């Protein structure tokens, strides 16, 4: 063997190691971005370590038979006992996915005990309902159907009514070999709800590098949103909806408000764990300008009120009028393109 061979082998290994180190270092610490934000690529929100990520584009309409059936069922009043309430009654798709009421009406004039959350972008939430008692959109469907102050029905009642309709018998036969069952009803509605996303908000375009998507006040509002700590809970692609948090981290909201209800107990109603008392799923802020009143108890009529209350009880701060005004300006940039068109500017 040539006595130079071991040296060459060692040099080759060191070279390979150095190359690997460069690659790994580049992945962990990407090169600095250019000063001109207008040329920023789509992934730049991540590279800049932004707490919020843009929503993905809505998939093109595929004509999926199960999605079409889910849309029919979402608007179907026969899901309620007296044929008066549909999913769309409380989750109005032309109104930010809510009905705009503090508490939604159910059958026989019953009134709900908790503010209706938006259905828009619910697919991006890690659990459903304020207290997270449903792990999936499919599991969520059964809740309103069986709730005595919402639809007040049963699966057997719903299936019997749908089975009497030729259009539903044909639609289910086309979409599901097993026909009309609780599972196929839930699956179809959940599939439709997963199409109810609102991409391309002005703020999404800003994150993707369009510096003109936000004006100076909106950009300053976002800066304050981050610097004051709002983004510690409202982050990710859905700007919330991805973990639980106590309502009243730095102040006792419920003691100050008074008249505590069962709904105020939040996650405690699911787990029975004392640590979960007054804990709720952090709501998404997408389209928040359209979804007043705010909080599980509808305790804030306006965005300005909601921001001030959050500042006091979640951040332990008394926000200035200027803070509130600018943050609200930023929040208005989170309105995306609603299903069927409209929404974002």
Image: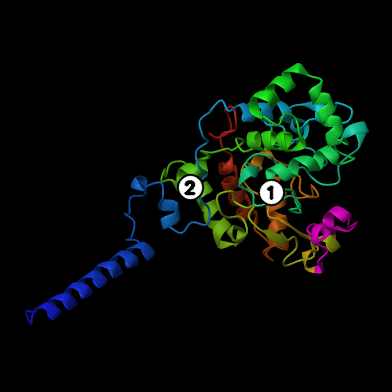
Q: In this view, does 226 lie above or below 116?
A: below
Residue 221 image offset from top left, x and y in percent: 55, 52
**Element marked by disc 2:** helix
Q: In this view, does 152 lie to the left or right of 14?
A: right
Q: Quadrant of the N terminus?
A: bottom left
> Which residue occupies the foreground of this view, 149 or 299?
149
Q: Quadrant of residue 289?
A: top right
**Element marked by disc 1:** helix
Q: Is residue 264 magenta?
A: yes
Q: In this view, does 276 lie to the left or right of 1?
A: right
Residue 236 image offset from top left, x and y in percent: 56, 53
> Residue placed at 42% from the left, 43% from the top?
210
> Which residue occupies the foreground of this view, 15 or 10?
10
Which residues lie in the magenta part? 257-274
Numbered circle sitting on residue 216: 2
Q: Quadrant of residue 143?
A: top right
Q: How crowded is mark 1: few (under 14 residues within 10 Å), some or many (20 or more)?
A: some
Residue 21 image offset from top left, x and y in percent: 30, 70
Numbered circle sitting on residue 304: 1
Numbered circle sitting on residue 171: none
> Residue placed at 72% from the left, 67% from the top?
250
Q: How is the image coloured?
A: rainbow
Q: Is residue 279 magenta?
A: no
Q: In this view, does 340 lie to the left or right of 28?
A: right
> Residue placed at 88% from the left, 57% from the top?
260
What residue occupies the far front of the structure in this picture?
1
> Which residue occupies the foreground of this view, 130 or 228?
130
> Which residue occupies the foreground of this view, 17 or 287?
17
Q: Is residue 12 above or below residue 308?
A: below
What residue occupies the far top of the structure in this picture?
166
The answer to whether any part of residue 80 appears in the image is no
């Amino acid at each position: 063997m040539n006595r130079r061979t071991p040296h060459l082998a060692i040099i080759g290994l060191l070279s390979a190691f150095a190359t690997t180190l460069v690659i790994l270092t580049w992945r962990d610490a990407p090169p600095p971005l250019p000063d001109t934000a207008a040329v920023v690529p789509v992934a730049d929100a991540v590279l800049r370590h932004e707490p919020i990520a843009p929503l993905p584009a809505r998939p093109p309409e595929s004509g999926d038979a199960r999605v079409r059936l889910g849309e029919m069922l979402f608007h179907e009043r026969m899901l309620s006992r007296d044929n008066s309430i549909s999913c769309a009654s409380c989750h109005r798709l032309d109104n930010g996915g809510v009905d705009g009421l503090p508490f939604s009406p159910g059958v026989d004039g019953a009134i709900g005990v908790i503010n209706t959350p938006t259905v828009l972008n619910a697919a991006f939430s890690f659990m459903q309902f304020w207290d997270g008692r449903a792990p999936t959109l499919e599991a969520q469907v059964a809740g309103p159907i069986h709730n005595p102050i919402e639809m007040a029905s049963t699966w057997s009642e719903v299936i019997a009514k749908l089975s009497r309709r030729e259009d539903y018998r044909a639609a289910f036969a086309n979409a599901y070999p097993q026909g009309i069952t609780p599972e196929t009803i839930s699956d179809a509605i959940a599939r439709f709800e997963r199409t109810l996303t609102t991409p391309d908000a002005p703020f999404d375009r800003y994150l993707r590098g369009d510096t003109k998507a936000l004006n100076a006040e909106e950009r300053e509002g976002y800066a304050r949103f981050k610097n004051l700590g709002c983004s510690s809970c409202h982050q990710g692609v859905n700007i919330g909806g991805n973990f639980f948090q106590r309502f009243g981290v730095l102040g006792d909201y419920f003691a100050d408000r008074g008249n505590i209800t069962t709904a105020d107990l939040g996650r405690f109603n699911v787990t029975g764990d004392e640590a979960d008392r007054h804990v709720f799923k952090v709501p998404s802020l997408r389209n928040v300008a359209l979804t007043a009143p705010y909080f599980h108890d509808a305790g804030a009529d306006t965005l300005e009120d909601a921001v001030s209350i959050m500042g006091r009880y979640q951040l332990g701060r008394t926000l200035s009028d200027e803070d509130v005004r600018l943050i609200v300006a930023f929040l208005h940039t989170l309105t995306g393109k609603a299903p069927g068109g409209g929404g974002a500017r």
